[in-house]
Amino acid sequence: MFNELIKAMEKAIQEVREWPDKAVHIFHHNDSDGLSSGAILTKAFEREGFDVHRFCLEKPYPEALRRIYEQQGCILIFADFAGRIAPMLCELNRGRNLTLILDHHVAEPSTDPKVHNLDAELYGLKGDRDITASTTCFFFARAMNPDNRDMAWIAALGAVGDKFFVDGRLVSQNREVMMEAVQQGMMEIKEDKSGEQYFLKASTKDIPCDEMGVYLDILGGAGYYQKGPDMGVKVCLEGVSSESDRMVAGLEKIKAKAFDSEIQRLQGGGVKKSANIQWFHVENRFSPMGVKMIGLFCETIQDTDFIDPQRYIAGFQVIPNEIPGFGPIEFNQVKISMRVSPYMEREIRAGRAMGLNILLPEATNRLGGFSDACHSLTAATTVAIGKEEELIEEMEKILGKQ
Ligand SMILES: [Mn+2]
């Protein structure tokens, strides 16, 4: 099955080489896996002499995709997202651009021969166990040029960052890239009772990979609107520097301040309640941080005393009308992130409460919103500004009908 994926990659690479345009547009996610993916692809295409235009997206919003597909005759590459919305990309593309998707999320097959969906899920691999986007990008880069083997450590970093372990260990393709990085002297594995700990061999000291994952997530998430992703990609290619350390420290400070003041507001009665849901709105108060922060904030408070353990938790954050590198873009939308308390987690796992992956996308669809990745215990979607209360009401209707 994996061989089939490599064959499909080789076919796509052949088409890339034959394509008249010698520039590539790379769109990648902003977490540690997405940043590692962006770094691997950037270096790999630069090595082949391509002009690389790299853009970091928090989500593949339809508004952004429409803007991207106004172009024609381009090579467009999506990394760490878009596997599931391949049919939508095909409809936007209509044979006009050469599109490659390098993802590991649940996927739908392509319907346009010019859109190559190289999502490992379509080739029998489990994206939440065997292979991350960074590992997928690594195998793609290596198929393009064996010299790209030297980026195994970047792929391994992304694999640890996405946190898919079996008994505390990376498995399958993710393990293969880690082992290659170990052989190259870039990584070290230490066994402990919970499994394996992975260390990046830096010039000064060994850095635990899980700490690097958090470091990259801060750059990409909290620093999204302040060139954090550029720094994250730089760190993936060149390692940490005093400059990146300073940026991360500054972002940590911004985050701590915003979170603390929001917690105070919620403790002072800022949480609204309906029958089964408790919710709040941070408006623009997390600015200039990215909208990943609302999910992180919900996680921070999900087990605190001002949160009712028996109700779902929902937080809203306004999405800025801008994508770095794109300029202004009219979203006029809010992001909703949902999480649950440890009590609700048990209820959902036991099948006594509805999972967020059913509840939220269903209500979002009814309001014409956009659903991307929703899981049973964590979920996020977007709806038009002003529809927040309606969305809560729709969810209550769905829960009431159970
Ligand atoms: Mn990923």
Image: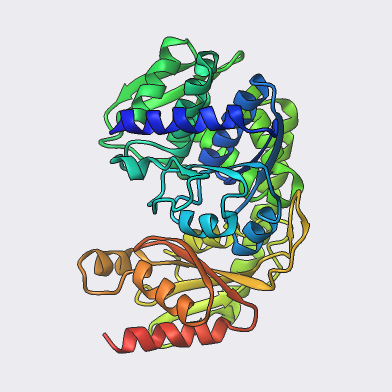
Q: Nearer the viewer, residue 223 or 369?
A: 369
Above or below, 319 relative to 325: below
- Find residue 247 and report its image quarter: top right
Q: Nearer the viewer, residue 291 or 190?
A: 291
* Residue sitting at x 48%, y 28%: 140
Res. 128 visible in picture: no
x and y, in percent, of residue 373 in the image: 45, 59
Rendering colour mode: rainbow
x and y, in percent, of residue 377 in the image: 36, 62
* Residue sitting at x 35%, y 26%: 175
- Find residue 135 and report its image quarter: top left
x and y, in percent, of residue 221 in the image: 62, 49
Above or below, 275 relative to 294: below
Q: Nearer the viewer, residue 12 or 319?
A: 12
Task: Indicate the quadrant containing the C terminus: top left, top right, bottom left or bottom right.
Answer: bottom left
x and y, in percent, of residue 278 in the image: 46, 79
Hey, which residue is sitting farthest right in the picture? 327
Task: Indicate the quadrant containing the N terminus: top left, top right, bottom left or bottom right.
Answer: top left
Res. 399 visible in picture: yes
* Residue sitting at x 62%, y 57%: 65
Taking the image as shown, residue 7 lies to the left or right of residue 280, namely: left
The tally of labels here is 0
* Residue sitting at x 42%, y 73%: 360
